[in-house]
Amino acid sequence: MNKQLIECVPNISEGRDFAKINAITAVVETVEGVKLLDVDPGKATNRTVITFVGEPENVIEAAFRLIKKAAELIDMSKHSGEHPRFGATDVCPLVPISEISLKEAAAHAQKLGETVEVDLGITGYY
């Protein structure tokens, strides 16, 4: 049987401070089995799109660490940019890639959201 793979594409509300962007993306690479594919900062939007992939449980752990680090480093009261935003991690979609259905990926997103709310006190919309 092939491995289940999901892609995670969080958008963080920081696109100008590369020290913060690097610190936030570095936590993704601390999770074994997760591959950081892309980091795409935008100066005008002050937003960075990050892409990583792996097996669901590992991706969920990496996403949690990223959300936590972004919340620690990004001060939304001082944020400005051309793109509308809700929080330090603005969106965190999970995309089914291989051997996993959209419904299964949605269940993993729900689990991630519940963990973020319980452990970090950050609510979300699913």
Image (cartoon, rainbow, N blue to C red):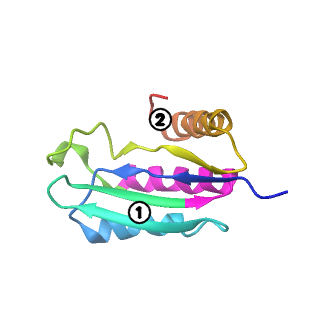
Q: What percent of the width, then of the height, locates residue 126?
A: 49, 29
Q: What percent of the width, then of the height, locates residue 76?
A: 24, 44
- Answer with the quarter of the image where residue 103 lies: top right
What residue would you read off at disc 2?
121
Compared across the picture, whether 55 is left or right of 28 comes to: right
Mark nearer the N terminus (1 vs 2): 1
Q: Residue at x 38, y 54 (%)?
A: 70
What residue would you read off at disc 1?
24
Tell me, yes or no, whether the highlighted magenta stretch contains residue 62: yes
Q: What percent of the width, then of the height, locates residue 21?
A: 33, 65
Q: What percent of the width, then of the height, locates residue 7?
A: 55, 53
What distance separates the C-alpha of mark 1 from that of mark 2? Answer: 19 Å
Q: Callout 1: few (<14), some (14-19), or many (20+) C-alpha neighbours within 10 Å?
A: many
Identified by mark 1, the residue type is: Ile
Magenta stretch, residue numbers: 53-72
- The answer to whether the residues at label 1 and label 2 have Cβ atoms under 8 Å apart is no
Q: Residue furthest right?
A: 1
